[in-house]
Amino acid sequence: MASGSDSAVINVDDVTVDSSTTEKDEVDRPVVRFSDEVVADNGTRKRNNNNGGETCTAASAVPKHLQTNGPSASPSSPRRQQHSKGDDTPLLGERDLILAATLVLDAKAGRNLLFRTEEKYIRSYILYHKFYLRWLLYFFIILDLSLAFFERPALDGVSLPYWGSMLIELMCLAFFTIRKLHVFYFQEAKVFFRDTKNYMIIGTIVLTILDMITYIIWVNQSWTTHPVRWSRPLRPFFIINFSDGKQIRRAFRNIRRTVPDILHVLVLFIFSVLLFGLLGLKLFYKRSNLIYPDGQPYFKTYLDSIWDLYVLVTTANNPDVMMPAYDYDNWFVLFFVVFIVINLYIFMSIVLATIYYNFKKNLKNEIKTAVYCKRKLLVRAFDILKVEINGRETVTPNRWTQLMGVIMPTKSAAQIDLLMQVLDINGDTFIYKEDFLNLSDLLHVELTEVKDRQSMLEKVMPAVFNSPVSNFVKMIVRHKIFRYTFDLLIFVNAFFIGFDVDVADWFFLIIFSVEIILKLYVYGPYQFSQRLWNIFDFFVIGAAVAATIVENIVGETNDEFSTLDIILVLRVLRLFKLFGSIQRFKGVIQTIVNIGPSITTYGGVMFVFYYFFAIIGMELFQGLISYHGYNESVTAPENLWCGNPALQNTTFYRMRYCSNNFNTVTKAFVLLTELTVVNQWHVLTSGFVFVTSKVARLYFFLFHVCCVVIVLNIFTAFILEAFILEYSLRTAHKLESAVEAKIKQLGLGIGMKPKTDGPPRGDEIELVNEEQLPAQEERPEYEESDSDTESLPDVSSESGLRFHLRKRNRKKVEVLLQQMFQSEIEAEDAGPEEIDEGTEFKPRRRRLTLDNVG
């Protein structure tokens, strides 16, 4: 670098830029180089490339000020111009600042959506992920799906004319089209058309419009021939293929990857059923005296033999299918025993094992892909922010403050400085690439000032809240005896309910209301609402109070119809909380808590399958079976036998299954739920076979394979993986991210000072960790306690900043898996250049791996 008295020349690769300095500045300042950047006269810089073409990017909501030209977004604002002490790094330009912040927030959100990096496209990308547009998308998807309630066959009294439902659907399709055009605007054309999800959405919209046109023609030309809306089963595709449905799409992707791996097992299983069906036909069909008790033929055709044996694999018709042959000759039992052992206990177990193995492999691959995509986003952000100091690329305090001012505009300077201290592993006021890659983990750790945790009453009336009487009340409520007392009262309440002692209802209602009021007083609404059981208690007791008031106003005196005892019995569910504090039950309870979000995801997957099969079932079977009561003496002749003479004297009718039909979408969902449970599903199927033909079995067979054999087994595999992970981590060392380790290195506990080798930078910052209490060393049971009172320490007398680290058993399964994999890869490893759904990764040797855990 050459220098003169008035200026210095900084070499920027192939670009030379003059910047005014003095000789003293040149001597005292570190050597700074910017890669692929041009330093302008105003102190900002522009990049020579647009960072386009990356495979892994993600979308996230960016603060409102990013979309304006106000002071908060301007690089020339007072906050942006505030340099850290001794740091004269030029500030980022508007476009680079927005792009870097968006990439970081995308890494935090974990989304994948490519976008152009010119400023107008970045702002359009930010707008695309605004929360109100996302919720508007959810609204139109729900509205589109809910049309099944109003279209023929509709619920009673809510039927719409076909043109009315079509207008609503066109409105939904218009929004979906606008949503895709928005994506097309900020993406390059080749990227947009490379995404199969876009093809699926566009194809579904086009097919739906074609279906509308053909339906209108069909209705107006031949309305008596039962016109069919064949595009309605495609509506759930919008849930899967919009980027906002990431979790459901991931579950379907896992299913899609798993199915090819289990096909060979299913083929062998089907071949075994076919072979045994042929053997059963040869054994029984010539024996004319072998029939079912209802008179149906017994193994008289090959297709009937296959169907009966397939149902036997589900155990739904056991031992009914065996009894005629068993009564005829006891030795025939060997045929059925061998069939059950081979196909039920061996093949079905192999199917589950295969699904579990491939699910685990695909889950690991999904987690690795997510980690690598997150790192690639952070690498791109680092490349925008970096400067070269003494031969190393780094992010300086000045640019860190500028970036965090955009990402976390509400945080104070002390909080932003503390965040930098956490990432500054070396303690030299610079953030290097390997440290910057932990930024998304850091942003997931909640950081507030202790004063922000004060209750509303403490802020409004501190003198009253901190008075001796109030402190005594707070001490009582925070004491474990307070919790034990009300836990005991829950047991007593359960005893009174079990023995129908109603005289104590008012006592328990009052005492539980007092408990809630005291907790609200001590912790405040915000702290109180952080515990799920507190929210549960609030709504249950609140509903009981409201129901009691209403009953007294209307004068309800019939105890049989009193809702007070019904609502209070829900309070007894809190007994599960007590079992959660017992070590032997803790693993099971915690697994249930951890899989909660995934239950919602797989519930969405089941809903997609249910909706698809329900719509098809309504088109195939609507009106063929209906409920008209079972008193044949008063039922009109046309309504006998579930409204269809084909069901006369059938098992379906004798078991009174007439309400199980496809006449409305709600009844269809109920019937599909019964089929999922499997019990008596062959009887339910037989009813629709009687009113149509044996071809109807194909519909129910496909539903069973898709929803029971595949989806439910994958859900079972997830529960197994979650339980094994939870159990293994309880016996292994505590798994924590690099960010959490650094936070602990700085110092934990109320009032503790940062543990740094040198003097702390900036203000003396006190750190508080929510896992520890002032007297934790006197309370060793706290680490394993999950109490709704012990987990809310009293910090009213403390000051400074507070990190809220989650305990290991409160983390989601996916978060734990990501942390485990991150320790398996090198600090600067961002993965292969191209990462897609088919990418396979080879594990490296590590201390604790997914294979060890799973």
Image (spheres, helix red, strand yellow):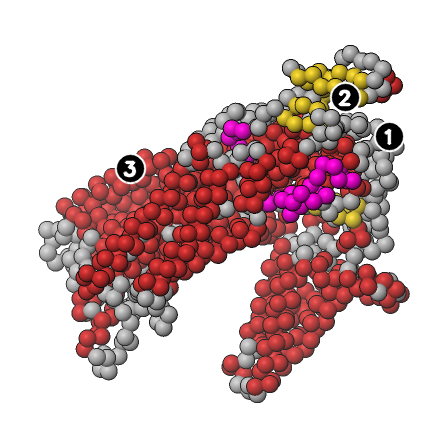
Q: Which residue is mark 2?
A: 19
On the rendered structure, is 125 left or right of 30? left
> Sequence-wise, which precedes: disc 1 or disc 2?
2
Amino acid identity at mark 3 = Leu
Residues under numbered marks 1 and 2 in contact, where contact means CB atoms less than 8 Å apart: no
Specify few, some or many for label 1: CA neighbours under 10 Å numbering under 14, 14-19, or 20 or more: few
On the rendered structure, is 120 left or right of 802? left
Q: Which residue is mark 3?
A: 268
Q: Which segment did they paint magenta? A: 52-80
- Magenta part mainly helix, strand or loop? loop
The residue positioned 83% from the left and 43% from the top of the image is 766
Q: Looking at this view, is 409 or 276 the one in front?
A: 409
Specify few, some or many for label 3: CA neighbours under 10 Å numbering under 14, 14-19, or 20 or more: few
Residue 73 in the magenta stretch? The answer is: yes
Label 2 residue SS: strand
Residue 130: % across, % down: 57, 48
Label 3 residue SS: helix
Residue 374: % across, % down: 58, 34
| Location of the N terminus (image quadrant) | top right
Q: CA distance from mark 1 to mark 3?
A: 68 Å
> Sequence-wise, which precedes: disc 3 or disc 2?
2
Q: Looking at this view, is 842 or 340 the one in front?
A: 842
The residue positioned 72% from the left and 40% from the top of the image is 405
Q: CA distance from mark 1 to mark 2?
A: 34 Å
The residue positioned 47% from the left and 28% from the top of the image is 840
Residue 493 can be seen, yes or no: yes
Q: Looking at this view, is 2 or 199 the one in front?
A: 2
Q: Looking at this view, is 419 or 100 the one in front?
A: 100
Q: Which residue is mark 1?
A: 758
Q: CA distance from mark 3 to mark 2?
A: 75 Å
Amino acid identity at mark 2 = Ser
